[in-house]
Image (cartoon, helix red, strand yellow):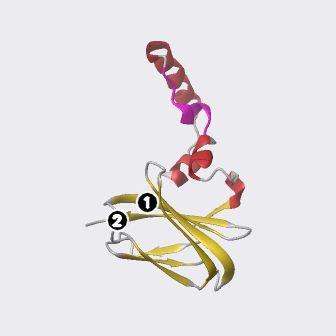
Amino acid sequence: MYQWHQDDPPDAFEINRNNVIYSYQDNRNPFVDHPEYLILIYDPTNAVNDIYYNSLSVYPNPVCDQLFVRAPFATFSACSVIINDVCGREVFSENYPVANELIPLDVSGFDEGLYFLVLKTNNRVFSSKFQVIR
């Protein structure tokens, strides 16, 4: 969904529809008025250009119990892994002093659904999504 939002910004039709709906409901879709809000919700410290997609390998996907994250390069110094649910709530956060190429994560306690994983190093942010099934 995050990638779709980046690939398909609001067009004139959506902006007009948002204005018409506002005239009836006094309610606007903030993501049409401010597409950048998505970045602010999921990671307020990063600009759009700081996020690198398709660099992480997250598997198996969908997952039941143990998720593996393959870093985009062999090793790097300190990193953090943050997982948010589809509502943007942080459900997992862990710092690693040194990360190897493969990071195992226990997701057995997660509810079924879609999640967003962010791996942060000192100068880059990598993002991926995965689904938990039961």
The reply, left or right, for residue 72 in relation to residue 107 is right
The reply, left or right, for residue 46 in relation to residue 19 is right
Q: Please tell me whether residue 75 is drawn above or below residue 42 in the rendered image.
A: below
Calculate the distance from the C-alpha at mark 2 to the C-alpha at mark 1: 8 Å
Res 10 → quadrant: top right
**Which residue in the protein does label 1 denote?**
115
Q: Of residues 23 and 44, which is closer to you in this image?
A: 44
Res 73 → quadrant: bottom right
For disc 2, the neighbor class at 10 Å (few under 14, some 14 to 19, many from 20) is many
Q: Please tell me whether residue 4 is drawn above or below residue 75 in the rendered image.
A: above
- Asked whether residue 39 is in view, the answer is yes
Q: Please tell me whether residue 47 is drawn above or below residue 60 in the rendered image.
A: above
Three-letter code, disc 1: Tyr
- x 68%, y 81%: residue: 76
Three-letter code, disc 2: Val
Q: How many marks?
A: 2
Q: Secondary structure at mark 1?
A: strand
Res 31 → quadrant: top right
Q: Position of residue 69 (x, y in %)?
A: 50, 76
- Asked whether residue 72 is in view, the answer is no
- Which mark is first along the chain, 1 or 2? 1
Indicate yes or no whether the magenta region holds residue 48: no
- x 47%, y 52%: residue: 89
For disc 1, the neighbor class at 10 Å (few under 14, some 14 to 19, many from 20) is many
* Quadrant into which the C terminus falls: bottom left
Q: Position of residue 27 (x, y in %)?
A: 48, 22
Magenta stretch, residue numbers: 27-35
**Which residue in the protein does label 2 denote?**
132
Q: Position of residue 50 (x, y in %)?
A: 70, 59
- x 71%, y 56%: residue: 49
Q: Position of residue 8 (x, y in %)?
A: 56, 45
Q: Secondary structure at mark 2?
A: strand
